[in-house]
Image (cartoon, rainbow, N blue to C red):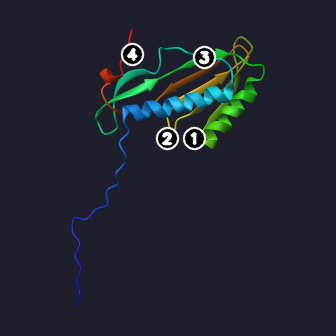
């Protein structure tokens, strides 16, 4: 008879550590793809991705980034919103779309996601302007290593 005893054996799931650099790169890639799909001439509302100190889910010191963009409006904002929705879904992101009438009578078309690539991203479009608002995940790092010159 063979007796096999296993004690103290657990299977630990090891999640890859997200660094601040990787969090910034994946956020920037999604924003650039979104700008390209939407079309138009985009302007950053900051001097590049803006770093903020944060705490990672494991409790480590970290950095998250925001990098909002603005562009002129388009003649068919709903069509652009639908194009962005499809782009994000093709990348595997869960999305939520909404079209609402604003106080000025214009229809605001927006699509948002909170998923595996960024903490949150929101694209909105009207005939007068388009906006991308984004916040990356918190990746390990020190915010001082990502300071923007001139701030």
Which callout, 4 or 2, points to the residue nearer the camera? 4
Query: What is the quadrant of residue 142 in the picture?
Result: top left
**Dots 4 and 2: beta carbons under 8 Å?**
no
Say what secondary structure mark 1 lies in.
Answer: loop
Question: Closer to the N terminus: mark 4 or mark 2?
Answer: 2
Residue at 64% in and 23% down: 124
Q: How crowded is mark 1: few (under 14 residues within 10 Å), some or many (20 or more)?
A: some
Mark 1 → mark 3, Cα distance in angstroms: 22 Å
Q: How far apart, in angstroms, are the residues tagged by discs 4 and 3?
A: 20 Å
Q: What element carries label 4?
A: loop
Q: Identify residue for label 2.
A: 116
| Quadrant of image for the C terminus | top left
The residue mark sitting in front, 1 or 3, is 3
**Residue 129, percent from left and from top:** 67, 15
Q: Which residue is drawn at 55% across and 23% down?
A: 133
The residue labelled by disc 4 is: 148
Report the Cα–Cα distance between label 4 and label 1: 29 Å
Mark 4 vs mark 1: in front: 4
Q: Name the residue under label 1.
A: 93
Q: Distance between the residues labelled 3 and 2?
A: 24 Å
Mark 1 and mark 2 lie on one chain; the one further toward the N terminus is: 1
Q: Position of residue 135 (x, y in %)?
A: 48, 27
Upstream in sequence: badge 4 or badge 3: 3
Residue 40 falls left or right of residue 7: right
Determine the secondary structure under disc 2: loop
Residue sitting at the far top: 150
Can residue 119 be seen here? The reply is no
Question: Quadrant of the image for the N terminus?
Answer: bottom left
Q: Do the residues labelled 1 and 2 touch (CB within 8 Å)?
A: yes
Res 92 → quadrant: top right
């Amino acid at each position: 008879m063979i007796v096999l005893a296993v004690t103290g054996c657990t299977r630990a799931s090891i999640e890859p550590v997200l660094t601040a650099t990787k969090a910034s790169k994946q956020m920037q890639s999604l924003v650039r793809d979104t700008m390209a799909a939407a079309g138009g001439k985009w302007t950053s509302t900051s001097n590049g991705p803006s770093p903020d100190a944060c705490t990672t889910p494991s409790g480590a010191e970290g950095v998250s980034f925001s990098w909002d963009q603005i562009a002129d409006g388009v003649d068919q904002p709903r069509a652009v919103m639908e194009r962005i929705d499809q782009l994000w879904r093709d990348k595997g992101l869960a999305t939520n779309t909404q079209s609402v009438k604003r106080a000025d009578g214009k229809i605001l078309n927006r699509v948002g996601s909170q998923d595996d690539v960024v903490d949150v991203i929101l694209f909105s479009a009207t005939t007068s302007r388009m906006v991308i608002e984004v916040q990356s995940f918190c990746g390990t790092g020190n915010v001082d290593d990502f300071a923007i010159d001139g701030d």
